Amino acid sequence: MSSAERDGVADYLSGRVLSRAGGASPRGADRARRLLHALGDPQDGFRAIHVAGTAGKGSVTTFVAAVLSAHGFRVGAYLSPHAYSVFERFQLDDRPVDAATAARRLADIAPAVADMDRTGHDSPTYFEVTTALAFQIFAAGRVDYAVVETGLGGLLDATNTISRPDKIAVITTIGLDHTELLGPTLGEIATQKAGILPRGGRALAVRDRSAEVVEAISAEARRRRCELEFVDTSACVEAATVDRGATVLRLADGRDLRLGLEGRHQAGNALLALRTVEETARRDGWALDPGAVRDGLRRARLPGRFERREWRGRPVVVDGAHNPIKLAAVVSTLQDLYPGRCFPWVLALKRDKDLHGVLDVIGPVASVVVATEFDATGADHAVEPVPATEIADLARRAGVAACVEPRPLVALQRAVDLSTGQEPIVVAGSFHLLAAVAGPRRDA
């Protein structure tokens, strides 16, 4: 990968981080639609699987793409956010796109972006530009399928510009997050997520424990005359096992499938993904190969999700989980792998996150919380870290031992010093924090 091309793409996209947030702004889909139309509507040049939800959508996207790729198809995947490099967002055949390809496709879209910039208030945001870049990469690369993860919400998301009637929509677990944009209740959030359902098309969704969520998604499906299937993942999550560090999904027919992503909750994500691929194959007239299914699920990888690292010889788990529902999955995985243990946590969060809920989840398994902050310089204006002192104060009030170290790498060393040496250090709360302790991350 050429460093000049890599840096050129990153620098250009960094410049799109303007003074307002992208993703689910009221005009976000409209701006993205105008930009894509100027490019010839590349988003409708491939068969798409569109994934929305609060938790698990990145994992489901990754599993679906990996299984399709294992069947010999050329597959694109669009993921967000990235953990360490912007190129993680643009996947071709299970690998981040190379810088030369990204640079060529960026040259395709830059003139159209510049034209919109000249109108001032219609300037595309960072997420809208990365979405257009992904669709241009996939169309130019002639993918057989593209698996597209929403950025935030669904109805107003820039990815919700795919208008092909054969799009398959997938809804993962719903929880309270981004309430300032999506609404304060589970039902309102579910309705926003269900905004990706294709009219007269086909969709699958996790059968959520919340009746409010199920009814909201069902109502939107009825309104759009979309055929909807709920997939009950609870039994497979309970039946999943952890074998030598790998999660094993046990299917109803007795097959055991090892997963490339850790945690029993990943069994539910894998089952939803597998059911999505089965529906895709049925619709398009090809048969699933059991060997390809096994290989795809086993090879799936997603940076920053229960990712094992080492720090000066000590085991570290890094995870971008930043809300209670995602952190509960991290805690469950830790308890499965290290029963009865407590862990030092290095924690940093964005201002818009539920800090009280986060501490309620991690408190029972945290031996100490080392509160820290990430550097938001150059980041979207919405990326404001909670001061480390505030995190530590609330942790102490919740009965959790805590200390303050604003510098992430120093905080990691502090956690090592406070550990017994028998358990991993956990670094979680923001992808910006992960990059600070585990690798480079530019806001591009």
Image (cartoon, rainbow, N blue to C red):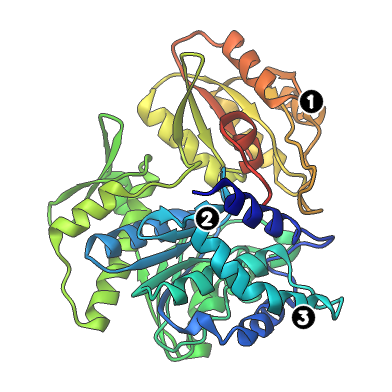
Residue that numbered label 3 is attached to: 115
Marking on residue 99: 2
The image position of residue 140, as x and y in percent, is: 45, 75
- Asked if 225 appears above or below 246 in the picture, the reply is below
Residue type at tag 2? Ala
Say which label, 3 or 1, has the lower sequence index: 3
From the image, state whether disc 1 or disc 2 is nearer to you: 2
Count neighbours of disc 1 (C-alpha within 10 A) and say few if under 14, some if 14 to 19, many if 20 or more. some
Residue type at tag 1? Asp
Residue that numbered label 1 is attached to: 393
CA gap between label 1 and label 2 equals 44 Å
- Asked if 421 appears above or below 391 in the picture, the reply is above
The residue under the point 29% across, 65% down is 68
CA gap between label 2 and label 3 equals 24 Å
Q: Could you say whether the residue bearing mark 2 is in a helix, strand or loop?
A: helix
The image position of residue 97, as x and y in percent, is: 46, 57
Say which label, 2 or 3, has the lower sequence index: 2
Please tell me in which quadrant of the rendered image residue 260 appears: top left
The image position of residue 418, as x and y in percent, is: 60, 10
CA gap between label 3 and label 1 equals 49 Å
Please indicate whether residue 76 sits to the left or right of residue 237 in the image. right
Please tell me in which quadrant of the rendered image residue 185 appears: bottom right
The residue under the point 58% across, 36% down is 361
How many numbered marks appear? Answer: 3
